[in-house]
Image (cartoon, rainbow, N blue to C red):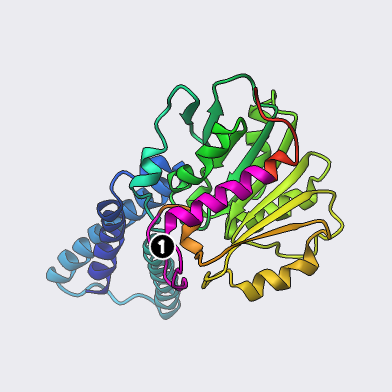
Amino acid sequence: MLLVVLGVALVAAPVWVVATTGDTVRHQHWALAAVLGASVVAGLLVLAVALLGARRRDRGPSPRRPLARRVLRGVAVGVGVAVLVVLAAAVVWLRPFPATAPALAALESDGSVEVRDEAGWIAFVPRDGAATTGLVYSPGARVDVRATAAVLRPLAEAGYLVVALKEPLGIAFTSPNQSASAMAAFDEVDTWAVGGHSLGGVVAASFAAAHDDEVTGLLLHASYPSGDMSTADVEVTSVWGSRDGLTTPDKIEASRADLPATTEFVEVPGGVHAFFADYGEQPGDGQPATSRADAQAQIVEASIGALDRLGTPSP
């Protein structure tokens, strides 16, 4: 019975993820689809094993095996079950926060911005001349990469190349040097900033600190570094919401000691964590005291200002 329940859970979890997120999975890094597929395959195999076991029991008792062999088999089964339980739980936890309508609307190319949905990222490319300053952006944990579009597209409209990363499993820590691949793919850009929202910003900060010979700027959206980068030769802008329940004002205040003295802090009054992208509400977040539209207008303005300080946008 345990194997049947486990098998059903392994199949049901990815089905639930896909059913509740629409076409979100196919727009993320391929690793998420691979994990969901592995869960389904594992579940079907477990159900097959359970069925074979039931048929054997129907044929009568099997010969009693030596104790050592029974113990070894019990340990192997226990470990296998534990691994599969973790897999099913991970699939449920990895369910992405799907992008909402405002972000999806910002993904259409037009006369000013070309939107390229590629294997490792979504790029917002200004059509008016070759951009020489760019931003590589890491979304927050488990946030649909497309959810960043309404905040990032205006930066491209201002003349900056913007690359939003498709992080493996939606977790920036799984590929901390992914920004380097994006930077290498756009060799026309000679001034780079990296940035991100929440956990994405944490990873971007670590990348900037380790590559301050290649990275000129760091843009933090409701985020802060995981360690001291106060001596890094990077222009930092930290944009934060006063009602954020996750990256709280106290955490932002504490981050000042870890950032360069020249860091510019921009408060979004009444803003919350989930206003830095469009994916609905987030558990644990604060209660906003402003509208999403007003907050995002301030976030965009501060972000463009951060890039303006680094270099000249495309003409």
**At x 50% / y 52%, what residue is drawn?**
296
The answer to whether 219 is drawn above or below residue 159 in the figure is below
In front of the other: 139 or 114: 114
| Residue drawn at point x = 51 percent, y = 67 percent | 270
On screen, residue 20 versus residue 130, left or right, reads left
Does 290 appear in magenta?
yes
Q: Nearer the viewer, residue 165 or 32?
A: 165
Number of numbered labels in the structure image: 1
Instruction: Tell me which corner region of the image, top left, top right, bottom left or bottom right, holds residue 191.
Output: top right
Query: Looking at the image, which is closer to me, 301 or 180?
Result: 301
Which residue is outermost to the left? 58
Q: Secondary structure at mark 1?
A: helix
Q: Is residue 127 left or right of residue 229?
A: left
Quadrant of the rendered image containing residue 91: bottom left
Which residue appears at 74% of the width and 45% of the height? Answer: 217
- Up/down of 271 relative to 33, above or below: below
Could you say which is closer to the camera, residue 202 or residue 242? Answer: 242
Q: What segment is highlighted magenta in the picture?
A: 279-305
Residue at x 47% of width, y 55% of height: 294
Whole-percent x, y for residue 308 in the image: 70, 39
Where residue 43 sits in the image (x, y, percent)?
29, 58
Residue 247 on the magenta segment: no
Residue identifier under label 1? 87
Q: Amino acid at mark 1?
A: Leu
